[in-house]
Every structure is written in C-alpha cells, then in structure tokens.
C-alpha cells in the first residue's frame, strides 16, 4: 500500500508540474519557429528575436514598464518600511485599527475597484485643480505604489515582530537617539525583508494589467498591455520571443538569488564551525576545572 501511494504521489506531482511548465516550454520552443504561424513548426530560426529589435512599440513599452517598476519598487519600499515600522513598534495608538485596515485594504479589495476609484479621483482633481493633465506615467506610478505598499509593510512588520528588541533597548540605554537606533540597528536587521519587498513590488508592477489599464495614457503603454492587445489579434512567434526573454531573465534572477542564499548559508556554517572549534579545548589538553 505504501508503494502504491508513493507512485500515486509521484504521478500527481508529475501531472501537476506538466500542467504548470509544459505551456512555458511550448512558448520557448515556438519562439524559435521560422513560420509566421505560432502553432505550425517550420524549422529553427532566430528571425523573431532579431525582429524584436525593430519593433519600436514593444521596445518603448518594455522601457516604460521597467522604469515604472523601478520607481514603484523604490517608493513602495520607502513608504512601506515606515508603515511596517509604525505598526510593529507602536502597536496601540489613536486610530491604529483604522490605520491597519487602510494598509491592508489593497490586499483584499479587487484591483478593478481600486483602479476605478483612482481613475475617478484623478479625473476629479484634473477638473478642480488642473492636475494631473491626463493619465500617464505619474498616475500609473501612484496606483502601482498604492498597490505594492501593503506587501512591503506586512513583510517588514513580520520581520520586526520576530526581531530581538533587546538590541534596540540596549542602544537606547546607551544614549542613542531613536533615529540613530533605526539606521544603525533596525535597518540592517530588516534589510532582507526590504529586499524581498522591493523584488515583490518590482514584480507586481511589471506584471500589472488592471491598474495600468485604468491609469495609462495613449503615450505611456506598458508591456503587458501591448502583449494583451496583440494576443487578441492572434498569436505571433514574436510574442513567444518576448515571453522567452522574460522567462530567461527571471530564471537567471532566481538562480542567482538561490546561489547567493546557499553561499551565504555555507559561509555562516563555516564561521560557526570555526567559532565552535576555537571555543573548544585544544586537542590533548585537559580543560581547567571551573
């Protein structure tokens, strides 16, 4: 019975992995197709990768998406870090429940509602004070930042909740100002969570469609919107080439991050082993009685 359950488990995992990764493999495979039809193989070719260099619409959309994702990730980390710090440090204050609910609202609200609300807000502001003048990069940046702040704040809050508070208390007892304690002690300890929030915000902004559809203008179109509009007209091997490049970049980033984490764990284990060896009595010597 155990052998049967083991084979059933392996079969289920195999089907599950095929369901998730076989379409991705097909995208990569057909990106090297010489035929203009995405589903008909006509031989190996790099034609569609060279054609990407001549597609100004895709290149401009890719540039817009990267700039928007970088700006969103940086602003989300700055604002979300302070929000998470406030929620973790000052747990009870006037309006803390409402403040926490407002921070978590973008996580539970449908993105369609958030995008529509921001669009109505920007239209009302344009009619009343003349800003913003139409929709574009600034409006999308505000919308993406609002969407990503919650993820950063929750990540930082969870890291601060598990942090040893005796370190900050000792620094304050020694006379360090609160701002000095934050930058010298708290900030280095929450740096991994800030990096995780930055990467998550960058990914969410780069992949966003709904918020960008509400807040984008005619001159600022992101890469997901361009790909979506082209897919509606029919599949094209050029789209497969774009998807393959994105998969390659993401795979390199994941592999590099995994290698870095494994290397850091090995270094830490080696340092701990060296410290334990230095503390232990030397070979051939009898430890002194306490």
Image (spheres, grey):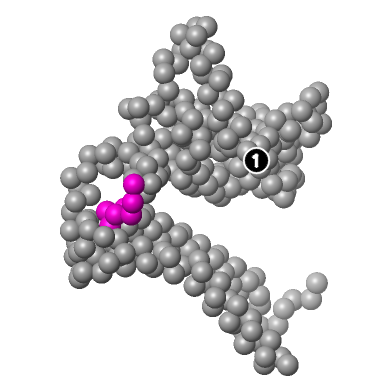
The correct choice, above or below, for 29 with respect to 188 in the image is below
- At a point 19% along the width and 51% down the height, the residue shown is 51
Nearest the viewer among 266 and 149 is: 149
Q: Is residue 229 magenta?
A: no
- At a point 41% along the width and 15% down the height, the residue shown is 133
Instruction: Tell me the quarter of the image containing the C terminus.
Output: bottom right
The correct choice, above or below, for 275 with respect to 72 in the image is below
Segment tinted magenta in the rendering = 233-239
- At a point 22% along the width and 39% down the height, the residue shown is 56
Q: Is residue 111 left or right of residue 140?
A: right
Number of numbered discs: 1
Residue at the spot of label 1: 107
Residue 257: x percent and y percent? 46, 59
Q: Is residue 19 left or right of residue 109?
A: left
Tell me where residue 187 sits by quadrant.
top right
Does the rendering let one see residue 229? yes
Residue 79: x percent and y percent? 57, 31
Residue 144: x percent and y percent? 51, 34
Nearest the viewer among 198 and 116 is: 116
């Amino acid at each position: 019975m155990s052998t049967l359950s083991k084979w059933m488990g392996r079969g289920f995992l195999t089907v599950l992995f095929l369901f998730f990764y076989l379409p991705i493999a097909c995208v990569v495979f057909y990106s090297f197709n010489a035929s203009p039809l995405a589903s008909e193989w006509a031989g190996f070719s790099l034609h569609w990768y060279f054609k990407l260099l001549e597609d100004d619409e895709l290149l401009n959309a890719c540039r817009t998406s990267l700039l928007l994702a970088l700006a969103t990730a940086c602003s989300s980390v700055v604002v979300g870090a302070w929000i998470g710090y406030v929620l973790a440090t000052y747990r009870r204050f006037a309006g803390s429940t409402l403040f926490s609910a407002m921070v978590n609202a973008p996580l539970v609200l449908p993105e369609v509602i958030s995008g529509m609300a921001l669009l109505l807000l920007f239209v009302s502001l344009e009619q009343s004070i003349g800003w913003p003048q139409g929709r574009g990069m600034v409006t999308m940046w505000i919308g993406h930042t609002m969407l990503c702040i919650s993820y950063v704040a929750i990540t930082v809050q969870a890291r601060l909740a598990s942090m040893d508070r005796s370190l900050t208390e000792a620094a304050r007892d020694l006379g360090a100002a609160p701002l000095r304690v934050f930058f010298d002690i708290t900030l280095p300890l929450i740096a991994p969570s800030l990096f995780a929030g930055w990467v998550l915000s960058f990914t969410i902004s780069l992949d966003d469609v709904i918020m960008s559809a509400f807040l984008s203008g005619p001159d600022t179109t992101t890469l997901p919107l361009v790909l979506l509009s082209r897919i509606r007209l029919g599949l094209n091997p050029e789209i497969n080439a774009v998807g393959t490049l994105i998969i390659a970049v993401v795979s390199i980033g994941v592999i590099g991050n995994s290698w870095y984490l494994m290397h850091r764990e090995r270094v830490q284990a080696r340092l701990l082993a060296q410290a334990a060896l230095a503390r232990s009595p030397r070979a051939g010597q009898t430890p002194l009685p306490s």
